Structures are given as structure tokens and as C-alpha cells.
Image: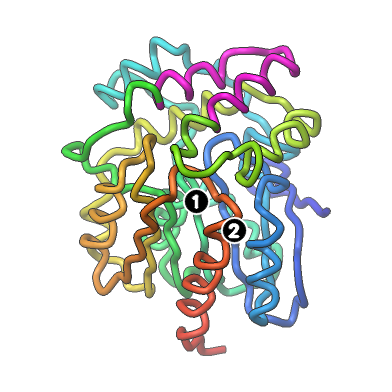
């Protein structure tokens, strides 16, 4: 594992595969660390002749934190109803800038960007605000920020809130496991085959609930991205689960309908998770999408 000094602070990252191969930048979701990517997903991308680069977003894992008080649960709930009710310590655009700094550090003019959930939103911001750095975009279980879209189910909101509520590591692990069981949907056990498998590893590596709250503030205040998404030129693939209780499937459909020429893959039994039974389908769709793109060097 390596690190570098981004303009905002230290970012930790990791390479998988031959560095001479085209880079695929993996951008993870809310509170997730680079150790929470399923190895089968990373290995599948590497096996297709690509180089995967994963990193800890700011405020989680081993990357730098922010010297600002986290928003309270009450403030986050208010921002969910009215984004102007909260001023975040940083924005998704700031987080996208971290990714640009990483590409600069790697000496890469650009990369194929794969983002999950919040990472999909950051990837969207990258494609909108730094278009020459994004060769292709794969947006997984993410959204446009369209305020007319249906929101999370009440159970999903409660699970997310409970997963953020403890400084004690063992309690945090138990809460996160329960939350993953709800967010992953009814078809696959996240504890057995999804990203809940990596919960203890992640919490013991770095438990930073205040950072997760600040990241969530950045999500809730980012607004409607559709005007910018409608101008994206990067070839885009949207993947979404038909059983997602946190970011309902209408959000994926809306993303694909908004980005010009976007391709769309809907996986019926997929919730808000990356379970092993769907990884092969995700890898195939993602690598085929990436390998279709010709990048001038």
C-alpha cells in the first residue's frame, strides 16, 4: 500500500495488476475503505488486462481527516429534506479533486472510473468537472440527485443511522453488520457473500464514524446533478439493483436516461451491496464497457 500528499492531505491507495495496463480507478461508497472491495471484482478486472487502483477516500480508512465537527443525526435528517439546511465541511467536488490529485501522482492523464454508491456520485462529478481525466465511467448503485426520485425505505434510513452511531469498535461492527443485512436486500446474505464480510477488517483498520457523517453531509448537499450529467461525453455504463432499499432502482434508470448514450444494466436481485453471486456479471459488463473505449495516448 502506498500514500501521497494530495492538495487536501494524505491519500492512501493500492495497485492491483500490471502498471503498464490501462488504469481503472475504483471509487468506493460512504464510509467504505479500499479493503472493502471484493477481491473477485478486482481480480476480474485485472484478468481482463487492466490495472486496478483503489484508494481510501478522505475521512475514512488511512487517508487524511478533516478538522471540522461532524454533523449531528438531526442535521443530516434535515439536510435529507432540505439540502440548504446544512453546510458540509467539504463537497463531492472536493472529493473528486482528490481523485484527480491521485491521477496526477500516478502520472496518468486519465483513467476509467468505476464508482459505487457515493463513489458513483464522485465519478459523476469527475466526468462533469474534469472530463479529460475520465476515459469511461461506470456508475453503480448511484443516483443523479434528482429530488423527484423515491428515497430510501424507512428501514434503510434507520439501518444507516444506526450504523453510524457508536465509537466502540465491537458495537460498531455489530451495527454495521445489521445495517448491511438490511441494505443488501432480501436475496443475498451480505454477511456470507457481500461486503459485510469485510466489516471487522475495516473497523479494526480504521474506525472513523465522524468521517462517515461528514461524507454523508457531502452527499446530501450535492444537489441535482442532472444538468451536468446531461453534458457528460465519457462513455457511461450504469449498473443498478432492482432490490436496492437505500438507492431505489429508479435512481439508476434516471442516471442512464440522463447521461447521453449511457448503457444500462439492471440486476433484479441486487440490493445495495456487491455480493459474490453477481460479481461475474458486473465484471463482464464493466470490462466489456471499458475495453470498447479507444484512448489516444
Q: Quadrant of residue 99?
A: bottom right
Considering the numbered disc 2 on the image, is that residue within a helix, a strand or a loop?
Answer: strand
Q: Residue at x 30, y 18 (%)?
A: 85
**Where is mark 1, residue-wise?**
116
Query: Looking at the image, which is closer to me, 174 or 172?
Result: 174
- Tell me whether the residue at label 2 lies in contact with that at label 1, contact meaning CB atoms closer than 8 angstroms: yes
Taking the magenta stretch, the answer to whether it contains residue 179 is yes
* Residue 187 percent location from the top left of the image: 46, 43
* Residue 52 percent location from the top left of the image: 67, 67
Taking the magenta stretch, the answer to whether it contains residue 15 is no
Q: Residue furthest left?
A: 148
Mark earlier in primary sequence (2, 1):
2
* Residue 173 percent location from the top left of the image: 69, 23
Q: Is residue 133 left or right of residue 225?
A: right
Q: Is residue 41 left or right of residue 154?
A: right
Query: Looking at the image, which is closer to me, 104 or 155?
Result: 155
Figure check: 197 above or below 160 = below
Q: Residue furthest front?
A: 187
Magenta highlight range: 156-180
Q: Residue furthest right?
A: 1
**Where is mark 2, residue-wise?**
26
Figure check: 293 above or below 131 = below
Query: Looking at the image, which is closer to me, 234 or 241?
Result: 241
Q: Is residue 16 left or right of residue 122?
A: right
Q: How many marks?
A: 2
Q: Residue at x 37, y 44 (%)?
A: 243
Q: Main secondary structure of the magenta part?
A: helix
Q: Residue at x 62, y 57 (%)?
A: 101
Figure check: 237 above or below 80 = below
CA separation, marks 2 and 1?
A: 8 Å
* Residue 75 percent location from the top left of the image: 39, 14
Amino acid at each position: 500500500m502506498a500514500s501521497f500528499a494530495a492538495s487536501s492531505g494524505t491519500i492512501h491507495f493500492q495497485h492491483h495488476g500490471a502498471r503498464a495496463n490501462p488504469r481503472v480507478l475504483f471509487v468506493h461508497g460512504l464510509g467504505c475503505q479500499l479493503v472493502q472491495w471484493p477481491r473477485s471484482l478486482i481480480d476480474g478486472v485485472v484478468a481482463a488486462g487492466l490495472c486496478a487502483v483503489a484508494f481510501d477516500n478522505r475521512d475514512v480508512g488511512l487517508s487524511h481527516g478533516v478538522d471540522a465537527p461532524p454533523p449531528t443525526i438531526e442535521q443530516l435528517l434535515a439536510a435529507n429534506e432540505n439540502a440548504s439546511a446544512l453546510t458540509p465541511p467539504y463537497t463531492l467536488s472536493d472529493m473528486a479533486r482528490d481523485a484527480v490529485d491521485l491521477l496526477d501522482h500516478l502520472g496518468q492523464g486519465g483513467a476509467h472510473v468505476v464508482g459505487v454508491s457515493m463513489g458513483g456520485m464522485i465519478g459523476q462529478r469527475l466526468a462533469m468537472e474534469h472530463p479529460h481525466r475520465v476515459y469511461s465511467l461506470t456508475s453503480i448503485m448511484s443516483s443523479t440527485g434528482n429530488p423527484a426520485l423515491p428515497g430510501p425505505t424507512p428501514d434503510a434510513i434507520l439501518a444507516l443511522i444506526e450504523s453510524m452511531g457508536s465509537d466502540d469498535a465491537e458495537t460498531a461492527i455489530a451495527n454495521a453488520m445489521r445495517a448491511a443485512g438490511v441494505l443488501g436486500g432480501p436475496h443475498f446474505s451480505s454477511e456470507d457473500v457481500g461486503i459485510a464480510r469485510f466489516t471487522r477488517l475495516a473497523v479494526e483498520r480504521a474506525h472513523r464514524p465522524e468521517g462517515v457523517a461528514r461524507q454523508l453531509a457531502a452527499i446530501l448537499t450535492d444537489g441535482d446533478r442532472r444538468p451536468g450529467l446531461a453534458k457528460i461525453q465519457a462513455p457511461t455504463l450504469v449498473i443498478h439493483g432492482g432490490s436496492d432499499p437505500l438507492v431505489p432502482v429508479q435512481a439508476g434508470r434516471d442516471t442512464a436516461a440522463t447521461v447521453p448514450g449511457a448503457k444500462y444494466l439492471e440486476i433484479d436481485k441486487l440490493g445495495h451491496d456487491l455480493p459474490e453471486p453477481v460479481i461475474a456479471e458486473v465484471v463482464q459488463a464493466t470490462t466489456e464497457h471499458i475495453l470498447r473505449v479507444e484512448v489516444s495516448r
